[in-house]
Image (tube, rainbow, N blue to C red):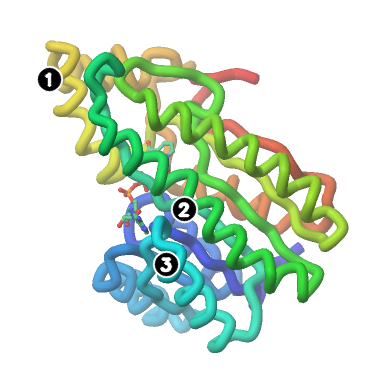
């Protein structure tokens, strides 16, 4: 099915993977809503898309804030009258050993990944159910299926998204709403660039070694996954015409994790 005129909210779309999804949705005739904490950067992404002749809309949204999520979603409905697609993508990474992981960091990370996914889903679902159509895609990770040292809350949150997607797949089916998870391997976005020196410090190895022996060690070819690879997988789910693809997770990781 084509994505023409489909209105899709993409959280965390001012940067990295979310930004690429917004660009690709617009290329396929859809209308990306760039929802991000960083409104300036969200507007810059929307302007760049609009400069190509496509439509795009930027909204300020802290996905951990119930009021901000409801307000942002209401703005989109006021402007376009509907929400066809939600890509819950906003996320951060904090790497530290579990033994002294600060509770505040644990809560912050879980809040962005899990509260954010819940709040944006709930806010969009009302409109999707009313329209009897919706496609929800959560940004998981290889860490939805696999663990790594130093990433306790991240691995916990990414596993949790599988559960949320499966519940929504069951509840949403009668309303023609599907829910799936895309699980990328390492992608060179600001989120990953930041953690290369952090992991090097924690593990006492060089940054090159972090890339080779930690991040890409188990891939089949030593390659990073790209934003383009991830966006294509997301839009594959978003364009699915029926409930045939629901409650699933798709790993895009150069074979790092094989399911
Ligand atoms: P990124 O840092 O490039 O972009 C994240 C975006 O999220 C930023 O624009 C940021 O402003 C926004 N954001 C952060 N907190 C927010 C909040 N509370 N409310 C709204 N927006 C917020 O990161 P990325 O690599 O593009 O990551 C996007 C998603 O992909 C994350 O969920 C991440 O866990 C996941 N992921 C990334 C990789 C990778 O290797 N980069 C791999 C697997 C999964």
Residue 239 placement (x, y as % from top left): 70, 58
Mark 1 lies on a secondary structure that is helix
For residue 199, side relative to residue 130 (left or right): left
For residue 214, side relative to residue 201 (left or right): right
Q: Which mark is residue 116?
A: 2
Within 10 Å of disc 1 (Cα), the crowding (few <14, some 14-19, many 20+) is few
- Mark 2 Cβ inside 8 Å of ligand 1: yes
Q: Nearer the viewer, residue 86 or 116?
A: 116
Circle 3 is placed at which residue position?
Answer: 35
Q: Which mark is residue 155?
A: none
Tell me the CA gap for discs 1 and 3.
Answer: 33 Å
Within 10 Å of disc 3 (Cα), the crowding (few <14, some 14-19, many 20+) is many
Q: Quadrant of the C terminus?
A: top right
Which label sits in the foreground, 1 or 2?
A: 2
Q: Quadrant of the N terminus?
A: bottom right
Tell me where residue 252 sits by quadrant: top right
The answer to whether 77 is drawn above or below residue 62 in the figure is below
Residue 167 placement (x, y as % from top left): 72, 43
Residue shown at 40%/56% (left/top)?
64
């Amino acid at each position: 099915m084509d994505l023409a005129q489909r209105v899709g909210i993409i959280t965390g779309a001012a940067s990295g993977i979310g930004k690429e999804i917004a660009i690709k949705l617009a290329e396929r005739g859809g209308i990306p809503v760039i929802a991000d904490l960083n409104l300036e950067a969200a507007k810059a992404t929307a302007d760049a898309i609009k400069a190509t002749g496509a439509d795009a809309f930027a909204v300020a949204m802290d996905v951990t804030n119930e009021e901000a999520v409801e307000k942002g979603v209401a703005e989109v409905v006021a402007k376009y009258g509907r929400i066809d697609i939600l890509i819950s993508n906003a996320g951060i990474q904090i790497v530290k050993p579990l033994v002294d992981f600060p509770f505040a960091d644990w809560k912050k990370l879980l809040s962005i990944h899990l509260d954010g996914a819940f709040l944006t889903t709930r806010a969009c679902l009302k409109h999707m159910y009313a329209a009897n159509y919706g496609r929800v895609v959560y940004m998981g990770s290889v860490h939805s299926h696999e663990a790594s040292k130093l990433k306790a809350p991240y691995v916990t949150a990414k596993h949790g998204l599988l559960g949320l997607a499966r519940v929504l797949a069951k509840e949403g089916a009668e309303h023609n709403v599907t829910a799936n998870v895309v699980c990328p391997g390492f992608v060179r976005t600001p989120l990953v660039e930041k953690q290369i020196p952090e992991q090097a410090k924690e593990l006492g190895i060089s940054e090159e070694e972090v890339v080779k022996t930690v991040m890409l060690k188990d891939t089949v070819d030593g390659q990073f996954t790209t934003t383009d690879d991830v966006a294509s997988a997301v839009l594959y789910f978003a364009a699915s015409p029926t409930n045939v693809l629901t409650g699933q997770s798709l790993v895009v990781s150069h074979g790092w994790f094989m399911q």
